[in-house]
Image (cartoon, rainbow, N blue to C red):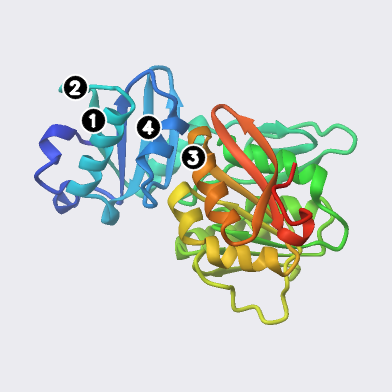
Amino acid sequence: MTSTSKIDNASTDDPVAMDMGDWIQVDVRTSLDAGELLGVLNDPDVTGAWQEDAHVHLYWPADRCGPDTWQGLKRALTQLGQSEPDDAITINHLANQDWNAQWSRLVEPIRIGQVVIRPSWKAVALNSGEIELIIDPKQAFGTGHHATTQLLIDWLQQVVKPGDRVLDVGTGSGVLAMVALRLGAAEAVGVDFDAVAIDCAREYGQINGFDDRLTLAVGNAQAQQPHDTFEPTLVLANLDRQTLLNAAESLCAYAAGGARLLLSGLLVEQRAEIESAYASRGVYVKAVRERDGWLALEATGMESCDGGLCS
């Protein structure tokens, strides 16, 4: 069973103190796109989001949400031009099993180019040349359904080279690192600040039969990773605008060493700010892709761009 309260009642009292469950599901009745709301909300503690009919469902761990969460959500909705009536936003307290049941009900297999991602309980007949990953919805966001993840999965199919050493910063479920290995990369390291995400990613790695070519570890996007013998040739960073800005120095250091960067998690209007921040460190955007209002950027160091902006 879940209990529901209006967000207006939660804005001054922390619902977590009620000890009603391990997860908080916030339902917003809106015509807004779930991805657009996530981008403007820019809350690193949001574990997932889903759009269903006229509602966006957002999920937080119960110990990471409170009054600031609700105020941030209200600000994001106001910024997007949505004024919420009293009954437009509700809070559900979910136990772990209810969280997994919610995702299980919603997640369907998807095809992104030659990559098929499916939950374990839904079999898919593979076409010639297709590769498959089994990702069951859990506490780590990253089942491949978000536009930014799909942008990078599609792009990886064109850019991964045999022998690539891939660093996936903010790896979440590890799906991008695993796709890169399936496409022929020699080695992949996935890092995330969230230990729960890394635990989930390691389980996915085992389920999909990956060996020690896949390393998953807790790490910070803003720091060079402590894998002394690992020098990436391709760095993936599907993060958010603020984290990409905060991590610019470390990511550009990889580019200065010759690595290609694939950056995502950006809305269209955030492109200029990111380009400027990275260009000031000698790293330039050479290609851009867009899906559903979200962007992915490929960037390289100055020596790969003839000393100026790549075309």
Q: Is residue 5 left or right of residue 258?
A: left
Indicate the quadrant containing the C terminus: top left, top right, bottom left or bottom right.
Answer: top right
Of badges 1 and 3, the one in the foreground is 3
- Which residue type carries mark 1? Thr
Does residue 143 lie above or below 64 as drawn? Answer: above
Distance from the alpha carbon under mark 2 to that under mark 4:
15 Å
Whether pointer 2 and pointer 1 mark residues with C-beta atoms closer than 8 Å, the reply is: yes
Distance from the alpha carbon under mark 1 to that under mark 4:
10 Å
Q: Residues within 10 Å of mark 2 (few under 14, many from 20)?
A: few
Which secondary structure lies at badge 4? strand
Q: Mark 3 points at which residue?
A: 270
Does residue 190 lie above or below 25 as drawn? Answer: below
Q: Mark 2 points at which residue?
A: 87
Disc 4 or 3, which lies upstream in sequence?
4
Which secondary structure lies at badge 2? loop
Q: Mark 1 points at which residue?
A: 90
Count all numbered tags in the image, as a single digit.
Answer: 4
Whether pointer 1 and pointer 4 mark residues with C-beta atoms closer than 8 Å, the reply is: no
Distance from the alpha carbon under mark 1 to that under mark 3:
30 Å
Residue 1 in view here:
no
- Which residue type carries mark 2? Asp
Which secondary structure lies at badge 1? strand
